[in-house]
Image (cartoon, coloured by chain):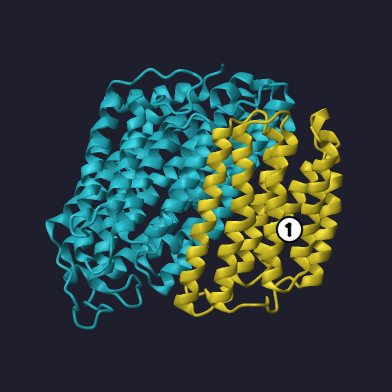
Amino acid sequence: MNASGLNLLIAVAMGLNLLALGSGRVSSLIRAVSFQGMALGAMPFLLSHEFSPWVTLVAVATIVGKGWVIPLLLGRAMRAANIERETDPLIGFVPSLLLGAGGTIAAVGLARILPLRPEHAGSLLVPGALASMLTGFILLIGRNKALSQVCGYLILENGIYLFGLLLIHTTPLLVEAGILLDVTVGVFVIGIIVDRIQRAFDTLDTRKLTVLRE
Amino acid sequence: MIPLLLILLPLAGATLAAIWPSDRMRPWFLPAIAAPHTVLAWVLMVHPPEVTDGEWFGFDAVARAVLPVVSLLFLICSAYGVPYLRVRGERPNRVFVSTLLAVIGLMSAGLMARHLGVLWIATEGVTLAAVPLLHFNRTPRAFEATWKYLLVGGTGIALSLLGSFCLGYASLQGNGSGDLTFHALAHQGATLSRPWLLIAWVLLLVGYGTKMGLAPMHTWKPDAYGEAPGLVGAILAGGVTTVAFVALLRVRSVLGAAGEGPMADLTLLCIGLFSVVVASLFLLGTRDFKRMLAYSSVEHMGILSVGAALGAPGIGAALFHVWTNSLTKGSLFLSAGNLRRSAGSASMDDVRGLARIAPRSTRLFVAGLFAVTACPPFGIFFSELRILRAAFDGGHTVVTAVFLLGLLFAFFGLARVVLGVAYGPPRSRAATPRVHFSETAGVILPSLLLLALSAWMGLYPPALLESLWSAAVAQLVALP
């Protein structure tokens, strides 16, 4: 296992989390998600001991899907809806950045407490997964625009993907591929619904979605 | 190999329906695929196939105990779908028909899944396939409901994936192989790493609990069920929730094998009771008869969860309750769909005197009210009685008291809404009956049939079913 290379990529992904939390422009949020997806997609190469066509296929599919297709879709939705900035979010940019930074430190600390196998103890996989999930939740809760929430959901998924890499040698690749497919289709479906919401409500501000309540 | 047809046949049907050119003929795909599916499921129920341990999909005792009723519910709903889609002839139905067929295929896959990863793929697949069904009406309210469903449901399902990974890591950490089949996990039993096992249980309970609609993860449910067409509500409330419940039962059996059964049971009991209480309080407040059905569904998911927490007799009773609840909810959702169409609204504020506007559907709806609030002779009375007996025998007196109080409040809440819209001087949202909705046999009989089946389950529960549930319980609580 190429441990230092892997840790470098995870550190990049964690840095992109903070970038996503601190940026007020939807386009830079999408770009952060795209780069994070590419970094994640490259990881199976570093984790596998020898060349295998299946691993390559899953990795390439991840890079293309998470790094290129999904961001393209989101970018198109963004331009169609003519949204450039996130306006007065529930959790401001500086507070969410501080939360994310604190969370990243806490994640590193928490990963030391969790019982891990010796080969995973020095790796950033678990802290990276925890930090990304926290970032995803902050974006899901703290932002108003549907597109920012989708990006939050993607970062949450990326965190879970990182955690799943712990099991890469034992989970059958067919299952991995199925999971990846589901996630990709899921984002497509979300993208379509975002588009429809934009047309039906003429806004992508989810605060306006308040007809249904008790 | 033959059980796999339960998955492949509907998926093939979905593909065919997607490329079929005519909107007028396409709805017939629903019964044409559902009928052989139900026949196959019931034949396999009577003649169970061999299941080998390592298989990813298998028609095992657990699948055998619930899949037949899900398939039957789907068949009856699909028979309703043909006249329904004719009434809604103005809408293209290509996506609706093919995703509905995909839903039954993926539900079968979820119920037969014996591998945690495959189970997750199937459940996520059902979640996504249901999306176009929810916003079939294309109103802004429907899109709002779909958005909430996607966001809450998507987060829940993501957490259950994380939980599945944690369970795999519990196996690795306990020097196991990391094999995610339920059989291998249960076999590893006590050597599963304790901390990871507990983390996995919490995440899986929250994740699949969201899909089931247990409180407090139920927030998507009233919106989604309230805005979806009646037959979609019936399939979601009777089928998809069952998939999530079976998932929890299977995971719980792994915890039982690892010696953490009492902890798992305690959490199931608490979350179940909480759901019953929350749902009954919301039922006292809601003014919309379709959202009311959603809260009633939350209540019954709570009852299932309480049953699952009460050991072998409770799990058996919960499996019985899966049958009675699916059939009764199916009937209620279909008649509620008819009422919603003839009145133009589902709110008590707009609608009254439905007994004169749509007399047959109203009669069915009122009868369904008594069925779902556990009046004899309907099946739910007997299944809830059995869960209560299991609680009493287990010495849970307080639980029983809270449970009964919740059921009482739920009865008040449901009766208030149903009787409120059913009787009195007629009033509806549709000022002049616009396109008059006629109560043809095609939209009445499915609901009637489901209600009759619910009564049959109460009066003459077949002995075969009893043996199915015992076999499933034996598989779920067996020690390796």
Q: Residue at x 25, y 42 (%)?
A: B33
From this view, report whether residue A176 is shown above or below residue B328: above
Residue A150 seen in the figure: yes
Give left or right: position of B59 versus B434.
right
Q: On what subunit does the disc labeled 1 rest?
A: A
Residue B183 screen position, x and y as percent: 54, 22
| Secondary structure category for the residue under label 1 | helix
Give the image location of residue A194, x and y in percent: 51, 68
| Residue in the foreground of this view, choosing between B128 and A192 | A192
Question: Total number of numbered labels?
Answer: 1
Residue at the image point whose x is 19% and y is 79% from the top: B434
Q: Is residue A140 left or right of residue A200?
A: right
**Front-lying residue, B133 or A171:** A171
Residue A65 falls left or right of residue B320: right
Asked if residue B217 shows in the view, the reply is: no
- Residue that sits furthest to the left in the current view: B441
The correct choice, above or below, for B9 with respect to A207 in the image is above
The residue pinned by badge 1 equals A135
Residue B198 appears at what percent x and percent y? Answer: 69, 36
Chain letter of the yellow region: A
Chain B drawing hue: cyan
Q: Quadrant of the C terminus of chain B?
A: top right
Image x and y of residue B368, in percent? 28, 53
Mark 1 burial class by Cα count in 10 Å: few <14, some 14-19, many 20+: many
Image-based side of A161 in relation to B319, left or right: right
Above or below B269: residue A203? below
